[in-house]
Amino acid sequence: MAAVSAMGALSSCDKPDKRCNIVFIMTDDHTAQMMSCFDARHVRTPNLDRIAADGVRFTNAFVANSLSGPSRACLLTGKHSCANHFYDNSTCVFDFSQQTFPQLLQDAGYQTALVGKLHLEAEPSGFDYWEIIPGQGDYYNPHFITMDGSSHQEKGYLTNLITDKSLDWLENGRDKDKPFCLMIHHKAVHRNWLPELKYLREYEDRTFELPDNFYDDYEGRIAASRQEMSIAEDMDIVYDTKIFTEDADTRLTGTYKAFISRLDSAERVVYDAFYDSLAVDFAARDLHGKELAEFKYQRYMRDYAKVVKSLDDNVGRVLDYLEESGLDENTLVVYTSDQGFYMGEHGWFDKRFMYEESMRTPLVMRLPESFDRKGDITELVQNIDFAPTFLELAGVEVPEDIHGISLVPLLEGESPSDWRTSLYYHFYEYPAEHQVMRHFGIRNERYKLIHFYHDQDFWELYDLQEDPSEMTNLYGREGYEDIISDLRQELADLQEQYDDPVRFGYDKARQ
Ligand code: SGN
Ligand code: CA
């Protein structure tokens, strides 16, 4: 009943049998710097740009906890980690008995499907159809887990296979009398950036511009100085940059060998023909210091760009199918990532920090024909907003315990004067891989205040207008007392609003 009455209020999707379909495409670790509709410096992504050109581009989209599992839990529940209880990748199991938007959509008569990476250590529920990859999955000849719980290997490149399965469900798998929500979750472009074989040589003639702060000295920023995600120090020459010889013996050589051993012998010949020549060239050059760091940066950028290329092709296949089938008229297409990523900024790869590159996430949408909004949406939005947005589009009443805010008014062209003015963030996975300390904080249009805690206790303040790269920690500087005091109060208010137990003492934050 709630669904029916809320639907009546919607001008855009007001025919009960014609509620909007949703195609939600989410990638892993794809950052806006590597998407040409956000940043034209590095790559061309014509199909992703097509979504933005035909629809809307969110210029201020963020996540609540910049890590895969937590980000997916925020997406499914519309709640911060403190409420969905999935804090980190290493210790948590998602409780699918809690409220999720796919379940609510299914209850309201939607056909729901999920294909690809889930990474929540649990079997999905709330879906009419799912087929997922185990954990992080594999790029080459990957395994899939099907709804009967069994696992099987398939031939091909993962990004293509996930798209094949998604299109097959759209064409043959669903009940065509019902509206649908299809979630296409790619592994691409997650580490270690293994390209589709046909694109091994793409971008090889490119020298990517080094970020201005590639040689950051982390002055005044303790957590930044202690991370283990530096391209120079922590990127594995075999696993990440694929400089492999039979006598290689780095920490991740074994993992690398396992990944490439998934290729059959003919594929392996093609793969080796490319990377073996790089290893020969590398051995002859005897690189050290900055030269070695910049070599690794170029290899990283090239392989990442190749993986983006296959991803962009596959997004194009989905858009083409929707157009050819006529489904595009009544389908919202969302493209986003589970978080942003560092492409050499601060000298890094990976994410986790509340700093801009990884707190941000790319977000573009192609809207159903009944919406005429186009261009940029600049309001502060966060991944907890997807759940209420999709529920409102489906005419389902948004439960009061959801933290996110529906984006539908923004999609209808409104600029609500009471839109949120700040965002809350909380990262927990520490001590862990990459050693990014636990922290929480607040970001408004101009400032960002971060508190690092657990085995440390210090604060950082950035003026994003004057210092968009977040190089100067202003916390404790004369003249910022009022700004800090206001931000600390607002942060405490957000923690109360979201009921994050951190305000009762940090040790209780994960109970
Ligand atoms: C793996 C990667 C890390 C990465 C995490 C989390 N290491 O553990 O570099 O930070 O995933 O990524 S690897 O040696 O296995 O490649 S996330 O996107 O899934 O959260
Ligand atoms: Ca990720």
Image (tube, grey):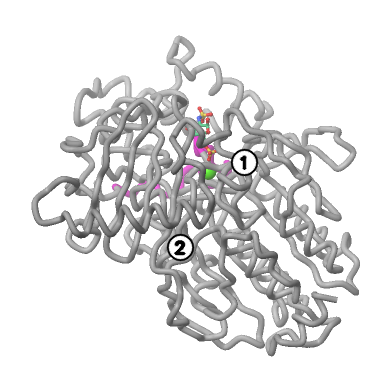
Outermost residue toward the front in this view: 504
Read off the residue under disc 1: 85
Image location (x, y in percent) of residue 141 = 70, 35
Image location (x, y in percent) of residue 97 = 78, 45
Closer to the chain start, of discs 1 and 2, is 2
Q: Residue at x 39, y 39 (%)?
A: 439
Q: What main secondary structure does the magenta stretch of the protein show?
A: loop
| Rendered position, 101 above or below 376 | above
The type of residue carrying mark 1 is: His
Q: Quadrant of the N terminus?
A: bottom right
The type of residue carrying mark 2 is: Ala
Q: Residue at x 39, y 63 (%)?
A: 422
Outermost residue toward the left in this view: 478
Give neighbour class at mark 2: few <14, some 14-19, many 20+ (Cα, 10 Å): many
The quarter of the picture where residue 389 lies is bottom right
Q: Residue at x 56, y 71 (%)?
A: 365
Read off the residue under disc 2: 61
The label nearer to you, 1 versus 2, is 1
Seen from the viewer's position, the closer of residues 238 and 10 is 10
Q: Is residue 300 left or right of residue 22?
A: left
Secondary structure type for disc 1:
loop
| Rendered position, 447 above or below 357 | below
Image location (x, y in percent) of residue 428 = 47, 36
Assess whether residue 195 is covered by the magenta stretch.
yes
Assess whether residue 62 is covered by the magenta stretch.
no
For the residues labelled 1 and 2, say whether their Cβ atoms are less than 8 Å apart.
no
Q: Start and end of the magenta stretch?
A: 191-207
Seen from the viewer's position, the closer of residues 261 and 88 is 88
Q: CA distance from mark 1 to mark 2?
A: 23 Å
Give neighbour class at mark 1: few <14, some 14-19, many 20+ (Cα, 10 Å): some
| Rendered position, 458 above or below 368 | above
| Rendered position, 425 above or below 334 | above
